Image (cartoon, rainbow, N blue to C red):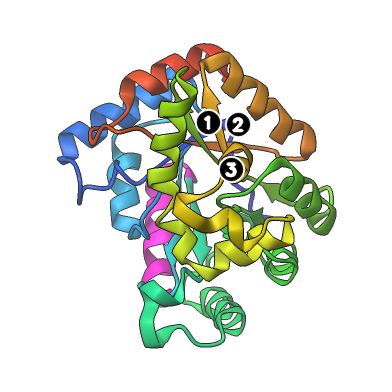
Amino acid sequence: MTSRPALGKIGIWTAALKTDYAPSEQVGEAVAELEELGYGAVWLGGSPSPDQAGVLLDATSRITVATGILSIWDHEAAYVAERHTALNAAHDGRFLLGLGVSHSALAGERYQRPYTAMKEYLTALDSAPTPVPAAQRVLAALGPKMLELSRDRAAGAHPYLVTPEHTAKARDVLGKEAVLAPELKVVLDTDLDRARATARDYLGRYLALPNYTKNFKRLGFEDADFADGGSDRLLSAMYALGDAETIRARVDEFLAAGADHLAIQVVSDEQALPREQWRTLAEALPLDKS
């Protein structure tokens, strides 16, 4: 049986390491430092291509590189399977394929029957000349049906914008063996009002996407929580706000709820790669620094 890439307990989720946003040399330096700091994985956001993930793999030797997530509407399955095989052959099996159905606002008219489309995409990966083993792919799953698919036809799930309560429910659906690697947004700022403003400014873009608001309602939130960038209650649930120790406590909640791995996304007002924040968190989080 093909083994799945090792993730460690803590990884970094970021779209800023895409070469769309930063030069290859800068990207390489940043991801190499993440590896040295002891993070187990880097999740490349923004529907990256396998070749963009390859830039990160080329710059490192140990860390797992995952797509978080690759949209099935943007990348043909046959191409993805071919590149997946080539990248893993060249980089000791360190590439994990994270797949998702994205959102109707982003995919447009292509967004038809997303659950069925994901099943068909997985079948295409299975039947490609160079198949992608189930152990080397995870799904961006929020609701029960996609979580079940993550359990049955992938290594597990990579839920985005969720809570420890969602993590516990996802673990119940996935069972003990499947990997559960949720994402958590953090704002490293001890000024709570300012931290909330930063968080609210970023969260607003997601509140226009029904996939997320539907999941929030499953967790007990209401329409009133979605107004003006999100209520304080919603922000407190979806973010860790404060100093590194406060964030560590929230990380421990996710791990205790059943997460095998947590993908940390640093949210800040800065446009550059948040390398200083990654360093600060590395001192507080349970990383493998060996």
Q: Which mark is residue 238?
A: 3
Please say whether residue 68 is visible from this viewpoint: no
Q: Which mark is residue 40?
A: 1
**Residue 245 occupies which quadrant of the picture?**
top right
Q: Residue at x 76, y 54 (%)?
A: 170
Query: Which quarter of the rendering shows the N terminus?
Result: bottom right
Please say whether residue 256 is visible from this viewpoint: yes
Magenta region: which residues? 77-94
**78 in magenta:** yes
Callout 2 amino acid: Gly
Q: Nearer the viewer, residue 31 or 205?
A: 205
Using the numbered discs, state the Cα–Cα distance from disc 2 to disc 3 in whole angstroms.
22 Å
Callout 1 amino acid: Gly
**x, y (%) of residue 108?**
37, 82
**x, y (%) of residue 102?**
46, 68
Asked whether the beta carbons under mark 2 and mark 3 sit within 8 Å of each other, the answer is no
Q: Secondary structure at mark 2?
A: loop
Q: Which mark is residue 8?
A: 2
**Residue 8 occupies which quadrant of the picture?**
top right
Q: Nearer the viewer, residue 82 or 178?
A: 178
Predominant secondary structure in magenta?
Answer: helix
Nearest to viewer (mark 3 / mark 1)? 3
Asked whether the beta carbons under mark 1 and mark 2 sit within 8 Å of each other, the answer is yes
Q: Secondary structure at mark 3?
A: helix
Answer above or below: position of 147 versus 40: below
Callout 3 amino acid: Met
